[in-house]
Amino acid sequence: MINLLRSEFFKLRTVRLNIWLPFGAVIGLVVITSLVGLLASDPEFFDNEDLMSLIGGFSILVAMMVGVGTSLGITSEFAHNTIRPTLAATPNRPKVFTAKAIVSVLFGLAVGAVAVSISYVVGSVLINGRGASVGLSGDDGSLASFFGVIVLAGLLALFGFGLGLLLRNGPAAVSIIILWPLLIEGILTGVLSLAGVDDPQKVLPYSSAFALVIPDADNAPGGRIYGGVFFGIVSLALVIIGIVVNNRRDV
Amino acid sequence: MLVTYGDWVIEVRNIVKRFGDVAAVNDLSFSASPGRVTGFLGPNGSGKSTTMRCMLGLDLASSGTATFGGRAYRSIENPLFEVGSLLDAGYVHPGRTGRNHLRWMAMSNGIDAARVDESLALVGLADAANRRVKGYSLGMRQRLGLAGVMLGDPGTIILDEPANGLDPEGIRWIRDILTYFARAGKTVLVSSHLLAEMALMADDLVVIGRGQLIEQCSVDEFVDRHSNKWTRVASPQLELLISAVGSSADGVTRIDNDPTTGTPRADIRGIDAAAVGQVAANNNIVLHELATQLDSLEAAFLRATAGAQEYSTTAPFTPPLTPPLTPPLTPPLTEGQS
């Protein structure tokens, strides 16, 4: 399994798109945080929660780009038929797809960690230089939100990989990753509210997962842990279904 | 130094592969032996590539088995050490360099990284190793695929149309290396449409049509069984010889005189070379040429598969009487284009 993990990680980092897509999103997050740190009015009133709300909110886009990257990683294997030499080199399909899933999650966690760390350091240095006193604290949820960004990126990496494995179609997988939270769950929230469901976001995995990156997660339906676990189970289910289906399909 | 590769017999038994109602491969059984190049022949759409994919577990056979040394491919832990395969040289990510393509393959099976550069040098791609594959010509991709086959020095080699896109030097190289592998004790199964090449390289043939086995035998047996056979003679006393052979022959066709000596020649059917020689000797007829002639493997193949062509033309191709007046719309490809 170690050989396979090394091989899959090598494949991931030797395709430029897999690096530039999340790297670009990280740069974007750092730029936004820097601009807010430089231009925010009344910086002395800026607190821990404000900074992590800013970073957490925009880190959702970074996590989505990670998901897009991992979904394109697996769908491009099918599009270019490189899945055939992959499975010819290692015919144990569940093992191959499990290794790919693990590498995807580790990649997502790494990108999330880099994104939140750099943007937090840059943002806090700039805003503190203008008279604020921002730090990370376990009391106001900023520390939990900091780690939540990393976890969300890892989970969206898994989600993107699972969708890509199941659909084998890059444009379809990317569309769903982007449109699911923006459109599908938005519509479902409205429909479920009209149907009288209390806290409809609680049954919507993507929306629930956003609680991971909100400092004030107590006000989110279900809370931080619930949101992460729910989305994690959905993502894992997608991967497992993808592995089972692909174990029985021609490639 | 020759390495012993063990008893890597390829056994395909009763493989059936259906796509909906269509049986692409239908109860196909054959075997390939160590130390021999086995050619896998069949018309377009006959099921060769599907069979190879089923053998490697890429397509799931509806029924039947394929084993390598008694084991199914999907049960082999690190197959690059045991079975090297190249089904299509295009199965490479275009954004990855040639070296990196081989490196992930090597890593997946725990093959030493140094072997990557050795394999690239073996196929003549050392200088292009760090170029992205999208800049490779088809021939270069074939060579890269063959480098992948050689990575683990496997005892069994399966290639689907390996000479596609190769230049004459490359075709000769692939023939020589596959023959070398077989002489070293490896089992080589290779499909190709280049029948002249197959005639030079293969020891045995597996011929299929419409997904079913037509014949498995040696190349010589196949050609012998499906060829027309006749005797070619060249003699300054040709007419005397023809009259002496007389009714023993089924037919005589006079052909062009020998281009070098100008000696009259003829093809005689229904009587073998030994009998013609005896007749000539009995009648003191001088012979400049006496040879048994056989159809080519191509002719034998076309005859054997005549009833199993999935796609065939309705009329023979007739070349135009005059060359086309307009230049081609696209320029010819140069090295590095694909």
Image (tube, grey):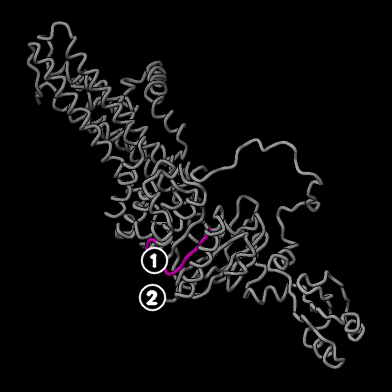
Identify the magenta region. Answer: B151-162
User: In the rendered view of the protein, which quadrant contains the N terminus of chain B?
Assistant: bottom left
Chain on which label 2 sits: B
Compared across the picture, whether B255 is left or right of A26 comes to: right
Q: Please tell me which residue lies in front, A198 or B102.
A: B102
User: Could you say whether the residue bearing mark 1 is in a helix, strand or loop?
Assistant: loop
Q: Amino acid at mark 2?
A: Val
Query: Could one spot residue B160 in this view of the protein?
Result: no
Magenta stretch: residue B161 in it? yes
Q: Is residue B136 above or below residue B49?
A: above
Q: Amino acid at mark 1?
A: Asp
Marks 2/1: CA–CA distance: 10 Å
Residue indicated by mark 2? B3
Compared across the picture, whether A188 is left or right of B242 comes to: left
Q: Do tags 2 and 1 sit on the same chain?
A: yes
Residue indicated by mark 1? B153
Q: Please tell me which residue lies in front, B249 or A231.
A: B249
Q: Could you tell me which residue is drawn at 77 percent across and 69 percent down?
A: B259
Q: Are marks 2 and 1 in contact (CB under 8 Å)?
A: yes
